[in-house]
Image: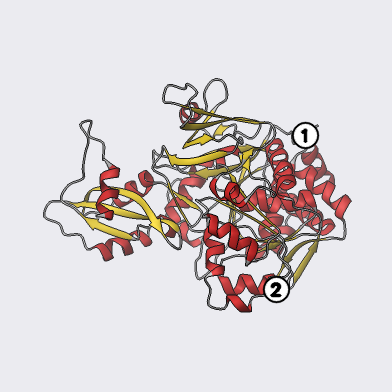
């Protein structure tokens, strides 16, 4: 029988017991303690009126409380809705409205930002009955003391493998983020395979720099550690000195991240002084990985195993993985072979198999659909269960998948997906902007960044610096264009669509 996320935590408590599950500053939590704390969180949620299948949102940086709260949501039979910590108020409001979350667990003091306060005045949040500040976590837990532990046990036992565990919002070419419904069974099965393929094992010390609101942090980080008995070392914000200090002090063995993480470490002026002796395993992806970086990760960062992979939120985060004994060229130039139980095809615009074309995926890992959006679901997944990824690629003679292009306009900024349509819609709210087109361009540090081509409203003048500042106040930092080009008109094809390749070419001129 396929396991569920609550059953995985129960098994971990029984199997790994006194092993360290989490290290967060001076706080050390054992697997048995994690299970007990998750049950207390579930009791508080049940006391708040949360029913099986209800949505509970979590808006906070990586921490012990984030982990405990998420497992509490699962144990209560509810559905976790993680919110991006880079969101502004209206962006978070869209997710909360769309998911109809009844409870929000958040913070008011992360890097000078009050997440709960940003929701003041945001309309359409009538379904949100409770807003809980994680700083008052103990008081919230106290509200569940009268709920018997047997109520939690019953909720956990009622969770089925095909039940939705998470709704993770991901943007699309239409601009409005959509909630991908991921299931318990798919999550567990995917990351059992993932953990085996990358070589994660009991006793590994895993520094999670990926945010927990992303499948990389939540699934390949937290869930994989609980599956294998590795300790979770949450890191709230990436910067080289703090990461390398923790690597040395906590004897970190597993360090994942997009290529920019490792490029930043290798190019840091204090690199020669870093203690890398404990590092054993690295997993990277989310962008093109230069062969030289893979070699340097092995030779200079001294990783025994370096692997890359490929996935989408809609595939529970993983489609394919390289194997640790693949040569550097395969690890850098491909995203490996599909994980067991997952099929990949390359098709043309008519859905016929071809050598180079759109990557489509079918298997247990494919989402159940977009929450409350059957139209978008039908556009993404055909009647035979094939998910259209929007990525262009081919399969080489070794069976490895190679990503060659993107059918969609999406670009990746430091590991985060940025969607031009969403950014363009936001910029069009500026009173001086008549038309806008956003393209992704290469960037040495972040992989790619956005450039906005803006046509002003007649009679208006656009100051690029001021427009960038305006964007920073209204959208997550990774979405903000790094450059604004004011133009008289956008290049259009005969059907009226913007020819973005012309815009990209103009940047090279």
Numbered disc total: 2
Q: Which residue is mark 1?
A: 2
Q: Which residue is mark 2?
A: 248
Residue 331 image position (x, y, % from top left): 60, 49
Along the horizontal axis of the image, is 218 left or right of 87?
right
Dividing the picture into quadrants, the one containing residue 460 is bottom left
Residue 486 image position (x, y, % from top left): 21, 56
Dividing the picture into quadrants, the one containing residue 16 is bottom right
Residue 146 visible from this viewpoint: no
Could you tell me which quadrant the N terminus lies in? top right
Whether 197 is drawn above or below 362: the answer is: below
Label 1: which secondary element: loop
Dividing the picture into quadrants, the one containing residue 496 is top left
- Residue in front for this viewpoint, 443 or 41: 443
- Residue in front for this viewpoint, 216 or 127: 216
Give yes or no for contact between labels 2 and 1 (Cβ–Cβ under 8 Å): no
Residue 391 image position (x, y, % from top left): 47, 38
- The residue shown at (69%, 50%) is 324
Whether 440 is drawn above or below 446: the answer is: above
Residue lying at the far left of the rendered structure: 459
Along the horizontal axis of the image, is 263 left or right of 222?
left
């Amino acid at each position: 029988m396929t396991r569920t996320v609550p059953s995985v935590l129960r098994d971990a408590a029984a199997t790994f017991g006194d092993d360290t599950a989490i290290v967060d500053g001076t706080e050390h939590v054992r697997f048995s303690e994690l299970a007990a704390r998750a049950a207390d969180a579930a009791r508080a949620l049940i006391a708040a009126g949360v029913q099986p299948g209800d949505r509970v949102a979590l808006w906070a940086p990586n921490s012990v409380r984030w982990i405990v709260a998420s497992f509490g949501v699962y144990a209560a039979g509810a559905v976790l809705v993680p919110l991006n910590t880079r969101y502004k108020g209206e962006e978070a409001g869209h997710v909360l409205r769309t998911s109809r979350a009844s409870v929000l667990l958040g913070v008011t003091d992360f890097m000078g930002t009050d997440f709960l306060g940003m929701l003041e005045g945001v309309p359409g949040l009538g379904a949100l009955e409770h807003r809980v500040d994680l700083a008052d976590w103990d008081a919230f837990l106290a509200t569940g003391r009268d709920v018997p532990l047997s109520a939690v046990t019953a909720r956990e036992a009622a969770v089925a493998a095909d039940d939705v565990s998470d709704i993770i919002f991901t943007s699309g070419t239409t601009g409005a983020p959509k909630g991908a419904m991921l299931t318990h069974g798919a999550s567990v099965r995917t990351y059992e395979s993932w953990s085996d393929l990358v070589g994660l094992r009991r006793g590994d010390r895993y520094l999670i720099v990926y945010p927990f609101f992303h499948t990389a942090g939540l699934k390949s980080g937290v869930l994989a550690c609980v599956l294998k008995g590795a300790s979770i070392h949450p890191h709230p914000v990436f910067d080289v000195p703090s990461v390398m200090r923790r690597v040395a002090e906590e004897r970190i063995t597993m360090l994942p991240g997009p290529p920019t993480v490792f490029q930043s470490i290798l190019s840091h002026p204090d690199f020669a002084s870093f203690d890398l002796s404990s590092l054993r395993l690295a997993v990277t992806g989310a962008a093109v990985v230069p062969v030289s970086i893979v070699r340097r990760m092995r030779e200079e960062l001294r990783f025994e195993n370096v692997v890359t992979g490929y996935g989408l939120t809609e595939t529970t985060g993983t489609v394919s993985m390289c194997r640790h004994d693949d040569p550097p060229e395969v690890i850098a130039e491909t995203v490996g072979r599909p994980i067991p139980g997952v099929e990949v095809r390359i098709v043309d615009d008519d859905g016929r198999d071809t050598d180079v074309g759109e990557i489509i995926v079918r298997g247990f890992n494919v989402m159940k659909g977009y929450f409350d959006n059957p139209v978008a679901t039908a556009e993404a997944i055909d009647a035979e269960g094939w998910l259209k990824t929007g990525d262009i690629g081919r399969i080489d003679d070794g069976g490895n998948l190679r990503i060659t292009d993107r059918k969609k306009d999406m670009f990746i900024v430091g590991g985060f997906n940025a969607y031009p349509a969403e950014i363009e819609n936001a910029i069009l709210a500026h009173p001086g902007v008549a038309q806008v087109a956003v393209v992704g361009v290469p960037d040495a540090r972040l992989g790619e960044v956005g450039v906005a081509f803006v046509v002003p409203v007649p009679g208006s003048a656009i100051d690029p610096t001021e427009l960038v500042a305006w964007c920073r106040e209204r959208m997550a930092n990774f979405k903000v264009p790094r450059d604004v080009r004011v133009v008289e008109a956008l290049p259009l094809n005969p059907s009226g669509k913007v020819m973005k390749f012309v815009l990209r070419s103009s940047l090279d001129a």
